[in-house]
Amino acid sequence: MPMSDDLFEGTPASSGDYDSSSIEVLEGLEPVRRRPGMYIGGTDDRALHHLAAEVLDNAMDEAVAGHASRIEVSLEEGNRLSIADNGRGIPVDEHPKFPGKSTLEVILSTLHSGGKFSGKAYATSGGLHGVGVSVVNALSSDTRVEVARDRKLYAQSFSKGETSGKLEELGPTPNRRGTTVSFTPDTEIFGDRQFKPHRLFKLARSKAYLFAGVEIRWKCAESLTSEDVPSEAVFKFPGGLADHLAEQVGARECVTAQPFTGTQEFPDEQGRVEWAIAWPLYSDGSTSWYCNTVPTPDGGTHEQGVRAALTKGLRAFGELTSTKKAKDISADDVMTGAEVMLSVFIRDPQFQSQTKDRLTSPEAARLVENAVRDHFDHFLTDNMERGKALLGEVMERMDERLRRKQEREIKRKTATSAKKLRLPGKLTDCSGETDAETELFIVEGDSAGGSAKQARNRKTQAILPIRGKILNVASASADKIRANAEIADLGLALGCGTRKDCDPENLRYDRIIIMTDADVDGAHIATLLMTFFFQEMTEIVRKGHLFLAQPPLYRLTAGKESRYAADDAHRAELEATVFKGKKVEVGRFKGLGEMNPSQLRETTMSPETRSLVRITLPAEFEDRAAVKELVDQLMGRNPEHRFNFIQNRAGEVDRDLIDA
């Protein structure tokens, strides 16, 4: 067929707009200034104070490594902060890979540079990615670093990540050593936001609790002081977390006269753990989690470890004292109302994001559980009356939890019987004839559904298979949502209604668990399901009923020993420890349907051996209108909104990792 000449007339608009000149290459610290949210989670107050935490973490790493005993934190007028330590001092000699540049300049002006990658300079550290102090430098209008090293004083200044001059040698300083970093956050990035003295004062004090061998001196300009913030203070706590707990509990009466405190080294020099726990009467309690002195407010695998240790310890004590009902104690029964402080020091920790809000290192759960469990057993049995008092208090919470559950179960059965509730034909329901919590697993496809039905506990676990990717409710009309068969089946199975009619009290299960393949398609299906719950059943999410299953990616076998790895990092850790020096056969699971029922039960469905991720709403999305706006941004028709949200909020996803 002859081609028409008009096919070649003109040039498409897009081709002229997109060529090699359209591709930007960001050098030095420019990526940080362009996208600060990717490095510090945003440009709000929390992100501003994260700059202070990054510099203070470096000073604390020197102290924990045994090279510094004193840190000074000084807040001056003009939003300027200085943090000094008496450690080794940043090296100032020429860096071998950057001729003509001092190591100090390389560290301050280059991403992913630092002394914490190989483990030679620091056994455990809070700064891991080599981006901390360079990010602070990039986002500050004026940064000055002074280094006292080898009895000489050096200094170098920077502005917005760029060097303002060469390294200066200021002369001899025989009585000084260490590093001082002074910086002023850039108003182009943070606007008129100012450091909050009370927040920095609290941060400095908490760091002193986390390492008994350090003294932290606080100074603050007189114009910035208040009743809660003095101009000068010295923090040194020989008792560590035990001192912190005593201050937190104060004069409140507790279930046990003595709190449960202690510290334990991990085997093979893998680090250590310190804990301090009390059970005040009539208290809501609180939790504080730390890794390598860095706060991890969202908990993580170290939290899993201590929850498991306390729960298993009390169950064992119940068996020892012939208290048969103690076998039903859950981790929430033990933790509710408790004041819990846990600090771990481990090599090469893995965090969920650059802001380090959650620890994800798989080995931390095992190390912490083993270390804490032995001490907790002694705490309970050394004083039997103390152990019985704590067991009795926890069992009261357990009885209350089971009573509420029984009321819900009666309500569920009554509603089903009275209304002759029509359930979807493909739902394989649980019998519910037990005091244990009931669960609904939503799985994709008949293959995974069949395996899950064989792997489940028939009394407590129900299975609902869905076919393919369900409707994206964020971009669908109300009529289309109502007409969708998969969504209709979900609504029938859950029985709690949708939108303004959604009532968590009518939910037929305690937990809704999304269980999809560990691949891109599985992640997409899980995202569509979460979108459905966020928009149609917001209260279910708010009340903490929604979870994600965590199936493994790999099965490692050497001889008769087999282990499962959650991801590539976990696989590498197992190969370097459990299977070190052995010939390992590695199998990768392409989907849940490839697992036989026993494997699926062991890795993903059994409460004894699995891990779940609880899906929650970020604090700023507590009202329904904000939730709708969030869903529209993430899953709506406008891709630009989605792109902007990901760019600006990548470090702020709030998911509550729990042991189950």
Image: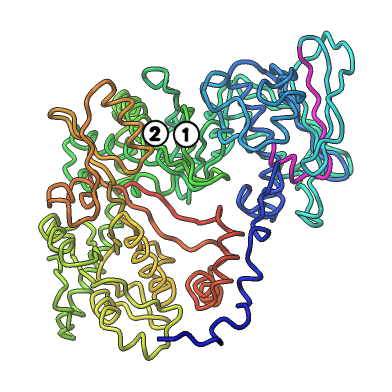
Q: In the rendered image, which quarter is residue 391 located in?
A: top left
Query: Within 10 angstroms of label 1, few (less than 14), some, or many (20 or more) residues?
Result: many
Q: Amino acid at mark 1?
A: Pro
Quarter of the image containing the N terminus? Answer: bottom left
Kindly identify the residue that appears in the image at 23 percent across and 75 percent down: 493
- Highlighted magenta segment, given as a residue range: 134-149
For residue 349, the mark is: 1
In the structure shown, which secondary structural element does the residue marked by tag 1 occupy?
loop
Q: In the rendered image, which quarter is residue 260 located in?
A: top left
Q: Which residue is mark 2?
A: 364
**x and y, in percent, of residue 306 in the image:** 38, 37
Q: Amino acid at mark 2?
A: Ala
Kindly identify the residue that appears in the image at 34 percent across and 59 percent down: 547
Would you say 196 lies left or right of 651 here?
A: right
Up the image or down, 292 lies above or below 631; here it is: above
Up the image or down, 45 lies above or below 267; here it is: below
Kindly identify the residue that appears in the image at 20 percent across and 49 percent down: 606
